[in-house]
Image (cartoon, helix red, strand yellow):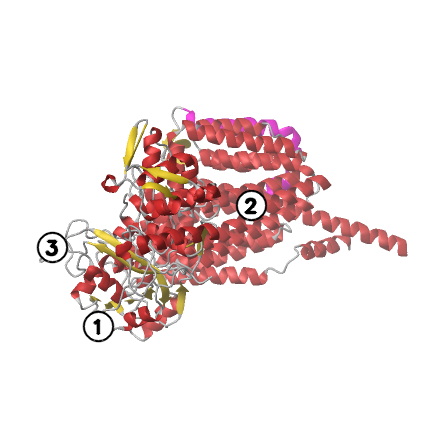
Amino acid sequence: MKELRRNMRLVGALLVVMFVGLAAWFAMTVFTQGSIWASDVRNNRLRASNSLRGDITDRDGNLLATTAEDGSRQYTQNAAARRALSQTVGDTAGMSGTGIETFFSATLLDISASLTDRLSELFASKQHVGSSIQITVDGPLQAYIADKFPEGYRGAVCVTNYRTGEILAMVSMPSYDPYDLTGHPNANVEDTAYLNRCLQGLYTPGSVFKIVTLASALSNDAAVTGQSFSCAGEWAYEGGRVVCAGNTAHGTLNLKTAFMRSCNVTFGKLAYQLGLERLRATAETFGFNENFKFGDFVIYNSAFPTQVSGMNGLVWAGIGQGEVLVTPLHMAMISGAVANGGTMMKPLLIDRVVNTQGAATATGKSEVYRQVLDPQIADIIADFMYQTVESGTAARAAIRGYRVTPGSPASYRTTPTPTPSPWSSRAAARARACPASWPPGR
Amino acid sequence: MPTSKVEKMKKALMRSNTHLLLSAVMLFQFLAMLLIAFQKQSVNLQALAFAVALPLVTWSVTALMGRCWPVDRAILILVMLLCSVGLISLSDIAKSNITPRTQAIYALGGIAAMFAGAAFIRNWRNWRRHTPLLMALCLLVLASPYMPVIGIYKNGARNWIGLGGFSVQPSEFMKPVLILCLASAIAFAAACCGILLAEKDLGAVLLYFLTTVAMYYAATSNAFISLVGLGMGAGAAVLAYRALPYVQGRIAIWKNPWSDPENLGYQLVHALIAIGSGGLFGMGLGLGMPRNIPLYHSDFIFAAITEEFGLIFAVGLLAVYVIIIMRGLIVAFNARTSFHSLTAFGLVIILGLQTMLIAGGNTKLLPLTGVTLPLVCYGGSSLISTFFSMGLLLGLSSMNAEDEARDIETIELKESNVFN
């Protein structure tokens, strides 16, 4: 009987612990993901809600979206700025699914407001106004970038603060006007304009992927810095060949000069030297093949091949071609991690959520996503990247008065020189106050 | 004189003063039903009737059962609370008044079954002789969905039988019988699981299996064999996953319901949307739209409750189950024979595992299995059988109380002999 009791106590305790685990898990997921679940387009409660949507503001409090007295939804007055922010802010019809308007609609409407709030509003005969959301994006900056974006081209620009993970701008071109959506009489929405390419555009990274190949080489074999390579402008191997841009023969190179001149032959050889498994391991540390769940937005997953057909696939993967796919924001995270001493930050889009009473119910906190590199290795790569801008293939990225390192064509990690913008010059003032100081003063 | 002393002791051994709990539960029932009754322009008369009837029934059942036997009143009151949470939710969300009314009739049947269960376990002396008969009966009933006339194929599982427009789920009714039989013979469980597997009632298989392993371990203290059993169960689960596309679908949806939100993932996506909409405090009783969740009255009632009452209430509901489990374990610890001890233990384990499976399924912690949320969700088979199980537990608790009273009396008699 004594033993029986002991066993029953053990199993019983296990059951109770399981219940505690269930409750904790349940509470945690509702807390972290509840508003995202509730913002699903299939949620009829949102359409049935008679609350007014709260405001969306940028990091300086500039109004990006607000609800007018008559209940209509108003966006930024300046048409160019409105378009620049279109996919980031979203629209009332949910055309851009990743926009704040759609992705956080449950929060903006506050559909699960507490009963006391509802009652007090009922007595004051006020309509319920949902929470306001302040995002980390700098509205004027984003409008400025969109303005400088070459006409007629498609693409994306991400600007992030690599130390905090805050997204300062994500421009996706072509853009659209949230007032003139498809179905609207004078709508003229370009194809794919609803897509936020920073998050939903999967691109072949090309030469910027050499950062990952370089990181893999340095992490797996420190002696690689002393190795010398020779480039005849072309490297033919069994089953294929790789050429450098314009068939330029780079001659004898070390790792640094090969990176500076973006030598495909050398990096193809490096990839071959590493082998698929090691290269893939590094890529996966950087977040490739990972199911990203950042919470503030939905982002597509970047891909690195798990299997390649022979040597050709491996060599081309090493220079970011072939089956390698990446989103612009992820690429910005990768180069940001290099700048941040190898620490990749979790990207942040939501700065604060403020309820009707003016109390902040949620604030975006900087979080380390992962230590992807050894600090020493990060320093080496950062130096290589700096040299690439100073006297290498990325010389066009140089900005006088700033230290610039290339991330990707889509992610120059710097604050642009101030010019008059649709808003005040506050953003410009801040840009002056904190130039992109790099490498970090450690 | 001694008899009155025993009576006094019995009363004392009901342990806690449950008046406060009883009053709180009755107040909750009354207010919630009142809220539903006056929600719309026209007064919901049925809800109004419930507002009076629910507290009244709870009070009288507690009083009556407490008068008959010295049962653990806390368990009894919490069981009534869970049943009324189900009735309240159904009154609010069911599309017609018929559903809560039917559920109330089932609940009355269940209360009768609870009394029957308590009386049965108290008077079932020669259980050793009867169990083989019971087992044979149990297997027959479980296999009954395969019988030509009465078997029904429902929701991809053959686990219902029907007679003249009235259908029942045998696997529900066999739960208490399984526990009773398991307490005396473990091997029998394998046969039960086999039949259920053939009927594709995977939730019940899992439940029967885990309960059997837990009881086997408790009875024999053989951790090795129990772990081997669990391992074999896991192996069988992997085999089932490989072989049955139906199981693969369930697992895929559990991993990411949004991968197929319009077909396979439809139920879970809408359950999660509802849970998310409810947030911390819920949308309010009658203010949500839980009817958007498919099967809101049965498989997903936990999600529907979370939407309207909120996360805090839902966690509180889980806590009520935990309290019943813990009080039930105390009953198991104090039982005088290993048969009674194991019976109480098994009843508690099966209640806990079942709650765990369905609440976890609703909240995407576990893959969804179609078991019922005990005492809350709609359905007569489950409600009546769970009430019967709780009756068994209460009967055991009253036997413990009497045994303890007898012990104390003996000690006192001895002491008085010493002094005189």
Q: Residue at x 25, y 51 (%)?
A: A197
Give the SS element for disc 3. Answer: loop
Decide: few, some or many residues near mark 3? Use Cα within 10 Å; few <14, some 14-19, many ≥20: few
- Tag on residue A188? 3
Write the start and end of the magenta stretch as one range. B118-147
Examine the rendering and report whether any part of residue B86 can be seen: no
To which quarter of the image does residue A396 belong?
bottom left
Examine the rendering and report whether any part of residue A253 can be seen: yes
**Residue A356 spot, x, y in % from top left:** 34, 70
Q: Is A31 located above or below residue B124 in the figure?
A: below
Give the SS element for disc 2. Answer: helix
Q: Amino acid at mark 2?
A: Met
**Residue B121 shown in magenta:** yes
Q: Amino acid at mark 1?
A: Glu
Do the residues indicated by labels 1 and 3 lie within the same chain of the protein? yes
Decide: few, some or many residues near mark 1? Use Cα within 10 Å; few <14, some 14-19, many ≥20: few
Q: Residue at x 51, y 47 (%)?
A: B111
Do the residues indicated by labels 2 and 3 lie within the same chain of the protein? no
